Image: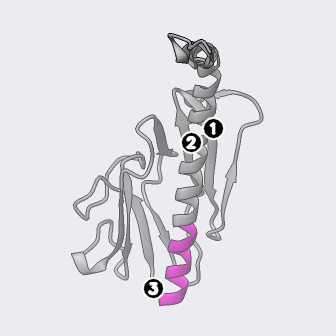
């Protein structure tokens, strides 16, 4: 019986298959990038809409005004409509623009979304204050979820405090939407 000097030569080598897979992945990657950006923006919309609904329930349960506002940390609200860095939820019986102390802060969310996603509120409304009956009063609040300059959806809170989401039917620039 003759022995093969290279016993591995009959085995199927994975390298040609690996090269083919790597090449096909490179061709599909640009399409996947768009899917990934859309998923990140939609996840941000779900996260903020859940937090807003929870804040409303807290106001009703505690029978006290509860405010949610954009924040970068430190227990303070921002004076700008950018919610991308996070938000702050606090008890607000005096209807102040900031928490009156650290014991009033119920939740501080930092870096909730991917760095490519922007959550921006419509102009004129920097915070959302829920009344003890669940109403939010004032004008509607609209938070736009954008990524790479494209609008992927909006989270809208009406005067009765109801939170809903809306996605654009066609590709829309984030600048054109606001």
Task: Quote the CA–CA distance across marks 1 and 2.
Answer: 6 Å
Residue sitting at the far right: 169
The first of marks 3 and 2 along the sequence is 2
- Discs 3, 1 touching: Cβ within 8 Å: no
Front residue of 161/147: it is 147
Q: Quadrant of the C terminus?
A: top right
SS at badge 1: strand
**As drawn, is 123 to the left or to the right of 99?**
right
- Which of the 4 image quadrants contains residue 37? top right
Which label lies toward us, 3 or 2? 2
Q: Position of residue 13 (x, y in %)?
A: 58, 17
| Residue 31 higher or lower than 122, as above or below | above
Q: Which residues are magenta?
A: 52-63
Front residue of 71/36: it is 36
Residue holding disc 1: 152
The first of marks 1 and 2 along the sequence is 2
Q: Position of residue 87 (x, y in %)?
A: 39, 58
Front residue of 7/2: it is 2
Residue holding disc 3: 64
| Residue 32 higher or lower than 13, as above or below | below
**As drawn, is 96 to the left or to the right of 141?**
left
SS at badge 2: helix
- Binning the other alpha carbons within 10 Å of mark 2 as few (below 14), some (14 to 19) or many (20 upward) gives many
Task: Quote the CA–CA distance across marks 3 and 1.
Answer: 34 Å
């Amino acid at each position: 019986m003759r022995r093969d000097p290279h016993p591995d030569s009959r085995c199927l080598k994975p390298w040609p298959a690996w090269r083919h897979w790597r090449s096909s992945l490179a061709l599909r990657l640009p399409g996947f990038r768009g899917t990934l950006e859309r998923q990140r923006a939609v996840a941000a919309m779900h996260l903020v809409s859940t937090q807003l609904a929870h804040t409303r329930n807290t106001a009703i349960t505690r029978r006290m005004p509860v405010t949610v506002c954009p924040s970068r940390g430190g227990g303070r609200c921002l004076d700008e409509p950018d919610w991308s860095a996070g938000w702050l939820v606090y008890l607000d019986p005096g209807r102040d623009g900031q928490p009156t102390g650290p014991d009033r802060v119920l939740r501080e969310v930092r870096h909730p979304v991917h760095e490519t996603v922007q959550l921006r509120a419509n102009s004129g409304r920097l915070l959302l204050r829920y009344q003890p009956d669940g109403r939010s009063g004032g004008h509607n609040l609209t938070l736009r979820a954008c990524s790479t300059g494209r609008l992927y959806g909006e989270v809208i809170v009406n005067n009765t405090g109801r939170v809903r989401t809306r996605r654009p039917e066609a590709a829309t620039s984030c600048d054109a939407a606001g």
